[in-house]
Structures are given as structure tokens and as C-alpha cells.
Image (spheres, rainbow, N blue to C red):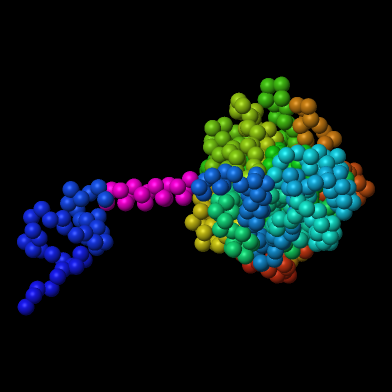
């Protein structure tokens, strides 16, 4: 029986092949040789690897060459389109969910100059449809070799349809997000605004960008507002509107050059409303950069006048240098510091108790309290009360207080009654809030905040007993002193006026006042602190020509309280609270009997 013949592809053992005879090699043998790890057969494997990498590098090089030779106008168009579509912002809402700022979808017109054959005709047609374009500027830009230019940003649907009907080759549209503020100038200085590229320029809009929004946009992770969680502010739009309304009316009545106001929740530090006039419309912020459009609550620094006496009284009481029954002589009506003289405004010429010093707004009594604590103690207390450093909130705009370069006894004397130290009103709000909320300094916020978070963030700065004394003193002033004009029946208001002469050319100008009024509601257990400010108000017939704070800022604050309290959930109480200040009654403080 004959043995079967082996084909070239059959496996053959070495001893089946005669010596010297060539070994048949098929495809299977070649592949096995390639992947066999023996050293003598590595050349085929290396060759295959080199071949593979060469093909890969050729593919990458080809892609790079293709991208490099892509027309510039396409690159520009892609980049512009990508940037425009990605520039989305989250909605900003008030504490009740009402929209304060939002994005709408719009389109912008672009042109690719290299594709436009007749530049003059294109210019004529486009300016006919978009008449606010500068024809010469547009013609010059269309005449360049650039691959992409903007013709007009953020056009209306009607304009888009008209441009589309023109049918100009090389002219097209890019979808964009446009920021709108549906409530006009309401909360303008808090919101700030976004520019045409939807980038925050000021206020909360700039703050949102600082929290990483632009990074999200750059990564293409926020292409529309619905991708982002709304930012809930502490502002109540209803209260914001009425505060602005009263300040606008007051600014006109008192012929002031500017006005401002704020309402703060003293238990959380939330800013419920914040207004600065003149303001602007953030949807069309053409005049936002004018010098009189600053945010006077955060950026302006002012001598706060007699409202600062609240800090002086609290400092003396908390330090133990005075108690509620301490007395101070105001005989003579003036005090001398070298060639400088400090006078009483409405002097009594008699000895006053601590509450009387506050009610009569005695400069002499305040000076003596401050001097009893001493210069260094005074500085330390004001620093603890956040009056000597820039106050940082979410708003990027803030200002350093103006502090005397050399602080001696005379400086302590004048600062005691509100002259010689200029602070941002929001700093003064924070300090007075701490005086009446039980003694905890809470940095104000424009973001919604819970009481639990506020307690965690608060820092104790005065004793609870001192806080009760300050609430009592402010209430007494609301009943018998300069705060009477804001004492709305049923709301147990306490407060303090402040009138400071403005510094003009390095000197105090007696006929130019900066007036302030601070009020707490209700005084026995304060929830809200109200502030009204007027810059250079004028006297009027009913005031007898006076332009001091009680006759303008005080009246405005009373009107704001009357309108805002029901909205804020503060029902009127037509019977006075029982034992509102137990410690003061126990100590027999002036006015309790």
C-alpha cells in the first residue's frame, strides 16, 4: 500500500524531509513565523510593525495638512459659531423664584469677505436693511482679506428675514444667547450686566463667571440656560421695587443729586433689597459706566454721621466703661482739642444718661464715651465690627474705608459721632445688624441663605446684654427722638438719624449734607434693618428749610417700612409688646419708668 503524498501545505516532520531538500512554506507558516518570538525570525515582525506605524503617521500627517490648508474663513466661522453657541448663562431669580435675568435665543449676521463679489452692492443692501450700521466702516471691513467678520450682533427676527431675502453670497447667521433683564432697572446694581458676548461685566453676573461658568462654556458643557441651575438671590423683587419707587420720589422731592437704600435681614445677613440712584437698565447699559452710576451701597464710602453713635454707645457699654445709667455732662456745649472745637448740634447744656446721649444725639456725650475706651480700644472695636477693612460680598465691586493715616485722640473724638472715618454703607449695615441681633456679626450676602448657615458663619462681637441695651436705646429714639418720623404705628420701630457734612476740596461744606437713616423692625426682636440715604438733599417748606436726615431719609424710611412690612410677613401689632426689654427695666434705665 503506497503512502499518501504530502502537499506543500501539509505539516511535515523534520525526519520526513531529506537533508538538503528545501522546505515548502505556505501562508500559515509565514504568519506563524511573524508572531513567533524566536530571535532569528524577528525581521518579518519588525517590518510589519514599521509598516503599521508608517501608515498611522501618514494618516495623521494627511489630516494636519488638510486642516492647515482649510480656508481661513471656515476656521473663523467654526470658531465664532462655537463660541457664540456655548456662551449660555444660568437664570438669576429672586428669593421667590421670579426671573431677574435670563437668556433668549437670537441670531447675529456675519460675512465672509472673500466670498463677496460686489462689496459696494453688499454694503448698500445691508445698510438699507440694517440702517444703524456705519456704511463706510462696513465697506472697509468687507474689503479686507479676512475670512470672517461680524456685520451686526443680535438682530431681530424681522431683520433676519430681510437679510435672508437679500440672498447675498458670503453673508449668513450665527445663533447666539442674548442676556435680558425683564424688570428694567430694578436691582440693576446687584445684577450687573453681561456684554454682547454674554460675559458678565459687573455685579452678580461677574460673580457667576468667577464661579467657573466660563470654564463650563469653554468646555461646551453649558450651551443653554436650561443646562444650568438658576442662581437664587436673597433679593425680593417686590420689596426691591417699592424701595426704588420711594427713593425715586424722595430724590425728586428733596432735590438730591443721588440716593440709595437697603433692607437687610439681621438674622441671616441676607440683602432683601439694595438700590442706588441714578441707576441704569442692564438690558441696555450704555450709561452704566458713568461716574454717577456707582453702587453707593457697596462702592461709595461716606462719613455716616450720627448713625455711627450707635457703635460708640455699644463700645462703651460692652467694654464696661459705661452702663445704661452712666451720665455725661454736656455743660458749655463744646469741647476743645488744641485749636479744634467740637460743638453740640442741639445741646441741652445738662448732664445726660446713656439713652439721652443717643436720643439727643449728643456729640459731647459720644466723645466722652469713646475717650473712656481709649484710642487703641476704639480702633480694636471698630476693626472687630468690620469697619476698618474692605467688606467682601458676592458683588465684585467694593471699596476700602477711608481711615485716618495717624489716629490720635482727636480722630477718636470725631469718629465717635460719625466724622473722620468713611465706610461703605453695607459695612455700617453689617455692624448695626450685629448690635441688634444679639451680638453676632454676619457678613451680608446677596445669595439666599438659611438661618442655620448664618449662625455657623456669624462671629460674636458684643454681649447679648449690650445688644438688648442697643435695641432699647434705638426704640426710645423712635418714640422720643429723631427717629419719630419713621415710627409707623403697629411696627415698634427703632432707629437713628445721621447727618454729615460732605468734604469738598478738603473742607467740610456746611450747605452740602449726606443724610442717612437706619431703622430696626420690630425693635423688641428685630428681623429687618432699613437704610435710606440722600446725597445733598435740599430743604423744603414743610421742613422749615432744614435738610437734615429726619426731614428726608427718616420720612422715606417710614414710607418704606409701611409698604414693605406686610410683604415681608411682619403683621402690625396695635398693642405694645409686654416686657420687651426685661434687663433694661430691671436696671431702671432712663425711659423705663
Image coordinates for residue 316, horizontal then vertical, percent: 58, 42
Total numbered badges shown on the rendered structure: 0
Residue 52 visible within the image: yes
Question: Foreground: 479 or 311?
Answer: 311
| Residue 195 located within the stretch drawn in magenta | no
Residue at the image point whose x is 70% and y is 35% from the top? 419
Image coordinates for residue 222, horizontal then vertical, percent: 59, 58
Residue at the image point whose x is 68% and y is 46% from the top? 73
Question: Foreground: 194 or 186?
Answer: 194
Is the residue 539 above or below the residue 186 in the image? above
Segment colored magenta: 45-61
For the stretch drawn in magenta, what is the main secondary structure?
helix
Question: Foreground: 561 or 128?
Answer: 128
Residue 9 in which image quadrant:
bottom left
Which residue is situated farthest in the front direction here? 2
Image coordinates for residue 279, horizontal then vertical, percent: 78, 49
Q: Quadrant of the C terminus?
A: bottom right
Question: Is 257 left or right of 590, judged from the image as shown?
Answer: right
Residue at the image point whose x is 81% and y is 59% from the top? 164
Question: Is 8 left or right of 141, judged from the image as shown?
Answer: left
Residue at the image point whose x is 66% and y is 53% from the top? 81
Image coordinates for residue 234, horizontal then vertical, percent: 64, 59
Question: Foreground: 435 or 197?
Answer: 197
Which residue is situated farthest in the right direction here? 541
| Residue 58 located within the stretch drawn in magenta | yes
Amino acid at each position: 500500500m503506497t503512502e499518501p503524498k504530502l502537499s506543500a501545505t501539509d505539516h511535515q516532520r523534520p525526519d520526513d524531509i531529506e537533508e538538503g531538500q528545501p522546505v515548502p512554506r505556505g501562508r500559515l507558516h509565514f504568519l506563524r513565523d511573524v508572531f513567533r518570538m524566536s530571535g532569528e525570525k524577528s525581521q518579518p515582525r519588525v517590518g510589519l510593525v514599521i509598516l503599521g506605524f508608517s501608515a498611522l503617521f501618514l494618516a495623521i500627517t494627511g489630516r494636519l495638512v488638510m486642516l492647515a490648508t482649510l480656508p481661513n474663513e471656515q476656521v473663523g466661522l467654526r470658531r465664532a459659531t462655537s463660541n457664540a453657541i456655548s456662551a449660555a448663562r444660568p437664570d438669576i431669580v429672586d428669593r421667590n423664584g421670579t426671573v431677574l435675568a435670563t437668556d433668549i435665543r437670537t441670531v447675529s449676521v456675519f460675512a465672509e469677505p472673500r466670498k463677496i463679489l460686489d462689496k459696494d452692492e453688499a454694503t448698500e443692501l445691508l445698510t438699507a436693511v440694517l440702517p444703524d450700521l456705519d456704511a463706510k466702516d462696513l465697506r472697509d471691513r468687507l474689503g479686507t482679506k479676512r475670512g470672517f467678520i461680524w456685520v451686526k450682533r443680535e438682530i431681530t427676527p424681522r431683520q433676519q428675514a430681510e437679510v435672508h431675502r437679500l440672498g447675498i453670497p458670503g453673508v449668513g447667521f450665527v445663533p447666539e444667547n442674548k442676556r435680558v433683564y425683564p424688570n428694567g432697572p430694578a436691582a440693576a446694581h446687584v445684577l450687573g450686566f453681561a456684554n454682547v458676548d454674554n460675559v458678565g461685566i459687573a455685579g452678580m453676573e461677574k460673580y457667576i463667571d468667577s464661579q467657573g461658568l466660563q470654564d463650563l462654556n469653554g468646555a461646551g458643557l453649558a450651551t443653554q440656560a436650561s443646562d444650568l441651575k438658576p442662581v437664587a438671590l436673597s433679593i425680593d423683587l417686590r420689596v426691591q421695587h417699592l424701595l426704588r419707587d420711594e427713593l425715586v420720589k424722595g430724590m425728586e422731592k428733596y432735590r438730591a443729586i443721588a440716593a440709595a437704600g437697603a433692607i437687610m435681614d439681621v438674622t441671616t445677613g441676607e440683602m432683601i433689597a439694595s438700590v442706588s440712584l441714578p441707576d441704569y437698565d442692564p438690558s441696555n447699559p450704555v450709561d452704566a459706566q458713568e461716574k454717577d452710576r456707582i453702587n453707593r451701597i457697596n462702592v461709595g464710602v461716606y462719613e455716616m454721621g450720627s448713625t455711627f453713635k450707635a457703635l460708640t454707645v455699644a463700645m462703651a457699654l460692652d467694654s464696661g466703661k459705661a452702663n445704661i445709667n452712666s451720665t455725661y455732662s454736656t455743660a458749655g456745649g463744646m469741647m476743645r482739642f488744641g485749636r479744634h472745637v467740637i460743638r453740640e448740634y442741639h445741646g441741652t447744656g445738662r448732664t445726660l444718661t446713656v439713652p439721652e446721649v443717643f436720643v439727643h444725639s449728643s456729640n459731647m456725650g459720644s466723645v466722652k464715651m469713646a475717650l473712656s475706651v481709649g484710642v487703641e480700644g476704639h480702633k480694636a472695636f471698630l476693626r472687630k465690627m468690620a469697619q476698618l477693612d474692605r467688606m467682601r460680598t458676592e458683588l465684585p465691586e467694593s471699596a476700602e474705608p477711608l481711615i485716618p493715616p495717624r489716629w490720635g485722640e482727636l480722630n477718636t473724638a470725631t469718629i465717635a459721632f460719625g466724622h473722620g472715618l468713611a465706610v461703605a454703607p453695607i459695612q455700617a449695615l453689617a455692624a448695626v445688624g450685629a448690635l441688634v441681633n444679639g451680638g453676632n456679626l454676619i457678613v451680608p450676602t446677596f445669595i439666599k441663605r438659611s438661618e442655620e448657615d448664618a449662625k455657623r458663619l456669624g462671629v460674636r462681637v458684643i454681649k447679648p446684654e449690650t445688644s438688648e441695651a442697643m435695641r432699647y436705646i434705638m426704640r426710645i429714639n423712635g418714640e422720643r427722638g429723631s427717629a419719630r418720623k419713621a415710627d409707623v404705628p403697629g411696627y415698634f420701630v427703632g432707629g437713628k438719624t445721621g447727618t454729615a457734612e460732605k468734604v469738598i476740596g478738603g473742607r467740610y461744606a456746611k450747605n452740602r449734607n449726606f443724610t442717612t437713616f437706619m431703622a430696626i423692625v420690630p425693635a423688641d426682636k428685630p428681623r429687618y434693618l432699613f437704610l435710606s440715604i440722600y446725597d445733598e438733599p435740599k430743604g423744603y417748606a414743610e421742613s422749615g428749610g432744614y435738610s437734615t436726615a429726619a426731614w428726608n431719609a427718616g420720612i422715606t424710611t417710614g414710607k418704606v417700612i409701611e409698604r414693605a412690612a406686610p410683604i415681608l410677613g411682619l403683621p402690625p401689632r396695635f398693642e405694645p409688646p409686654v416686657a420687651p426689654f426685661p434687663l433694661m427695666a430691671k436696671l431702671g434705665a432712663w425711659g423705663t419708668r
